[in-house]
Image (spheres, helix red, strand yellow):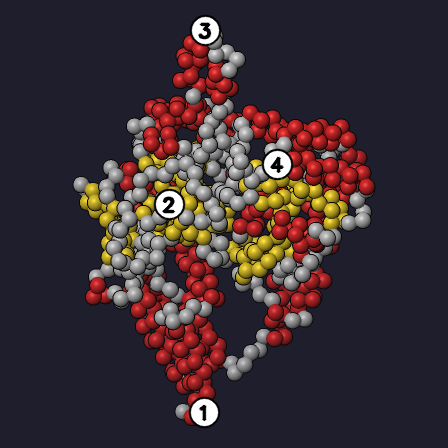
Amino acid sequence: MKQHLPRFILGALVMAFLIGHAAKLYQAGFITHIDAFIYDTKIRLTMPRTEDDRIVILDIDEKSLAEVGRWPWNRERMSTLVTKLFDTHGIILLGFDVVFAEPDDSSGLKTLESLSRKELRDSGGYQSALRELRPQLDYDARFAEAIKDKAVILGYYLSNSEGGASSGAIPEPVLPPGTFGSRNIPFISWGSYGGNLPIFQQAAAGGGHFNPIVDQDGISRRVPVIAEYKGAYYEALSLAMTRALLGFPEVTPGYAEEDFSSKSYSGLEWLDLNTPRGTLRIPVDENAATLIPYRGPQGSFRYISASDVLADRVKVGELMGKIVLVGTTAPGLMDLRATPVGSTYAGVEIHANLIAGFLDGTIKHKPSYVLGADVLLNVVIGAIMAFLLPLLSPIRASLVTAVVLAGAVSINLFFWESAHLVLPLATSLLMIAVLYAMNMSWGYFVESRTKRQFTELFGQYVPPELVDEMAKNPENYSMHGRKADLTVLFSDVRGFTTISEGLQPDQLATLMNLYLGAMTKVIRGHRGTLDKYIGDAIMAFWGAPVEDVQHARNAVVTALDMQGALTELNKELLEKGWPELKIGVGINTGTMTVGDMGSPVRKAYTVMGDAVNLGSRLEGITKQYGVGIIAGEGTRELVKKEFVFRELDLVKVKGKDKPVGIFEPIGAEGSVPQETLDEIKLWNQALRAYRAQDWDQAELALINLNRMAPHKLYDVYLERIAHYRQEPPGDDWDGSWKFDTK
């Protein structure tokens, strides 16, 4: 026994460390990450992969945008859509995974009313005609009338953005302040909201928020079915729709028996919906959130293009008695999320999964007693592995390990399937793996293969010279998720759909290979990590896995060189008789999550976070300003001494209330012609006048700029000035422009 003492001690230390994590005395991030991965794997392995025909998703897809026009559509069209769904197709419930936050002035009613108060105020005929036309032209009122007295649930979002102000209206809370008394329940709490126009919310049957909980790895696994705002409690869109389907029963909180819960535990474990036909119980976790019961990959519910309903291409009867959710899968509208079953998953299908799970009672649950069960199981496993294996031969130790492993996995899956209980598994698997490896080997034996494995791991993402650099000290690099200040770049070919339609398949393939090859060469030449190709789009980032203190500079140089490389490539394309390519590039610097993310089938070393989303949106708005590159203020701040920038605007992108500065990099300091610098100087004067609401001075400067060097940017600001003269922004205007679409 004495010769086994060192292994007993090491085994006990490993056991104590892992049980401490299981007992939540502390949290080891890598174990939590593994547990999340195992949870995702169990979801993928056990999901039914069947289509639920009770729920239909009305998709604002690329086809709809192409046929009907860009989003948002006018309310007259939305009124028609609602009327067709209920009156023609006979649906029983309609939910909107979109927000109707802005008034619709597309009918011209506002202009007509302005005329009636001014130029034509004395025209009786005009006033009479306007009174008759007003009901037809008031699109907002028509939409409100269309949803009135119908089973329509509107969606809204909750926000915690710094300095964020609420807008629109939200429904009454599902539970009033004080409902939970002195129980210290850690609800997901929000400070503001973005709701629908009051006229719509008042007309609708109800409303619910569509905020998921995004875990640290960027994956959406839970939704707070009850969220807190100013002491009151608001339901999720899925819960609101389920209640509407059941006749709006009251929500009753359910608590664990006090004999089986600790003083520190709030006790909230489920919500009951009491109906005449029985009680529907919805399990929740300590945050009043519910695990999303994914039925399968995207497409587990029937999708119908919204344009097909509007154009009467859907047969009457196909939607009879259906629950319909209106949402979008169009990438440009940015309602795609990373989930356990797909890295780009339509957010609207999350609500569909929850509604189906509520109705079927298939919601997974992780109650408080799971903690004790996990600790007890790991004590048994640890004792067997730490104190029995050192006494056994390698063959017998391997057999015991296999039995223990099979038992731990079988118990976990049994409770998962039979009782819908989520038991942690990572700690048990690590206990088994570490103690087995320690007892089978008195040291590590894989050092000789480190460099080859390292090269295989990172070679597909970063330039070979960086892999060689990393392989010298592989212990300094990891693909595990982490937070870091990085710079991300997005590029996209403008008008790619039109270009692709004019080429043969083999020609298109050749063109894309030439384009992607040229752009990738530039990215790698400046130490960039190629993230992915998304059709004709490219995503890359700087600063990981190899630390790069000049990540912002290298990204800006890359963007400028990409435009230069494209000029050379276009010469080759013109020689072939093919169309020229134009690209938009968005660059942004900020804190991001970087690491290896995905599934056992396919993974990607990628970045996620608000800074990444902003970079993508900056690329999307390059065409709005007629520029090839837009950099965020975080990027510009790091390299402003090295490059000449033209400030373009202060913008509020979709989902953000805080304005951010956006800039166009012109070139390196000392390389920009004097006439360009003079133009920028005059432009800065125009911009200052514009933000000071000195419209005359700004307009004069813009007209002069357009004479010097015509540019879409100047036309955009001239249009804004004309708009603000009619509708002044007010004294509290911060000079920003809000983009309502993603």
Query: Where's residue 49, x and y in %?
Result: 40, 47
Look at mark 3 in the image and give the residue it sits on: 125
Residue located 28% across and 46% down the image: 175
Amino acid type of the residue that numbered disc 4 sits on in the rendered structure: Ala
Q: How far apart are marks 1 and 4 (CA)?
A: 82 Å
Circle 2 packing at 10 Å, graded few (<14), some (14-19), many (20+), is many
Looking at the rendered image, the disc whose residue lies closer to the viewer, 1 or 3, is 3
Give whichever of discs 1 and 2 has the lower sequence position. 1
SS label for mark 4: loop
Closer to the camera in the image, 118 or 273: 118
The secondary structure type at the circle numbered 3 is helix
Q: Give the camera-side residue of 654 and 454.
A: 654
Contact flag, marks 1 and 3 (Cβ < 8 Å): no
Looking at the image, is mark 1 or mark 3 earlier in the sequence? 1
Q: Mark 4 points at which residue?
A: 692
Residue that carries the numbered disc 2 in the rendered image = 353
The amino acid beneath tag 1 is: Gln
